[in-house]
Image (cartoon, helix red, strand yellow):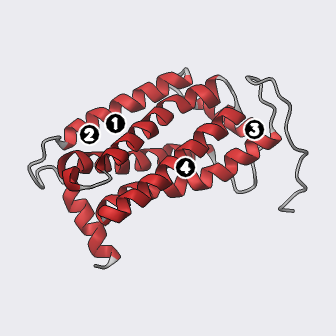
Amino acid sequence: MTLTTQLRSLLNDMRPGASKPTVKWWHGALFLGAVSVIGRISTGSIKDNKEQDEFYEKEKTPPWSPPAWLFGVAWPLNNIALTWGGLRLLNEGKTLKNRNALLALQGVHWLIFMTFGWAYFRKKSPVLALAWTQADTLVALSSLTLAYRDDRKLAWAYLPLSLWTSFASSVAWYQALYNPDPYLETEPLAEELPELVS
């Protein structure tokens, strides 16, 4: 099966009415809306990202760090893929030997997602943000590995999060090392790196 065929099949499965699932696509949409609202509340702001963007922009970040607006693109894509994966697990995954582990890992991911804003933006803690990011990376890679063993189509649901959190971990490590942490009352753990880009 080619990559194009696999992606086409994945998109067909996402169509409303593609099969007769117990948990419908709109259940997933409601769930995704709810966790997104809870995540926004945990940041301390529901209406505006401006304060969060400004905080991120003021932090010392590595040269490879993405602009703040990219998070607003990456996370909806990650979460749509994970919601599709959750629906597939609930509707079609009853024969998968790793189903319960994958559902538990989904639960851990959503808890991390909903509380990250509290750790990073509300507490302004790059060290806590690193811990949350590393935990989510471990969850994503574990999910990808477990899903790939049983259902390769399902594994696609975990690929975007695995790639994004792996990349974000490098940014989080840099921020934790080179920024003070007001919440933990620590100074930067490392000296400034020499300029990597002239």
**Location of residue 105 in the rendering, given as x and y in whole percent from the top left corner:** 41, 43
Amino acid found under the numbered disc labelled 3: Glu
The residue beneath circle 3 is 59
Which mark is first along the chain, 4 or 1?
1
Q: Dot 2, how many residues are within 10 Å of its Cα: few (below 14), some (14-19), or many (20+)? A: some
Quadrant assignment for the C terminus? bottom right
Which mark is on residue 28? 2
Amino acid found under the numbered disc labelled 4: Thr
Which mark is first along the chain, 2 or 4?
2
In front: mark 4 or mark 2? 4
Q: Are discs 1 and 2 less than 8 Å apart at CB?
A: yes
How far apart in space, not on screen, are marks 2 and 3 (Cα)?
A: 35 Å
How far apart in space, not on screen, are marks 4 and 3 (Cα)?
A: 22 Å
Which mark is first along the chain, 3 or 4?
3
User: Which quadrant holds residue 152?
Assistant: bottom left
- Provide the secondary structure element on which disc 4 rests: helix
- Residue at 34% in and 36% down: 32
The residue beneath circle 1 is 32
In front: mark 4 or mark 3? 4
Amino acid found under the numbered disc labelled 1: Leu
**Location of residue 98 in the rendering, given as x and y in whole percent from the top left corner:** 32, 53
In front: mark 1 or mark 4? 4
In the displayed orientation, state which residue is furthest to the bottom.
2
Amino acid found under the numbered disc labelled 2: Gly
Q: Are discs 4 and 3 less than 8 Å apart at CB?
A: no
The residue beneath circle 4 is 137
Which mark is first along the chain, 3 or 1?
1
Q: In the image, 197: left or right of 111? A: right
In front: mark 1 or mark 3? 1
- Residue at 24% in and 51% down: 88
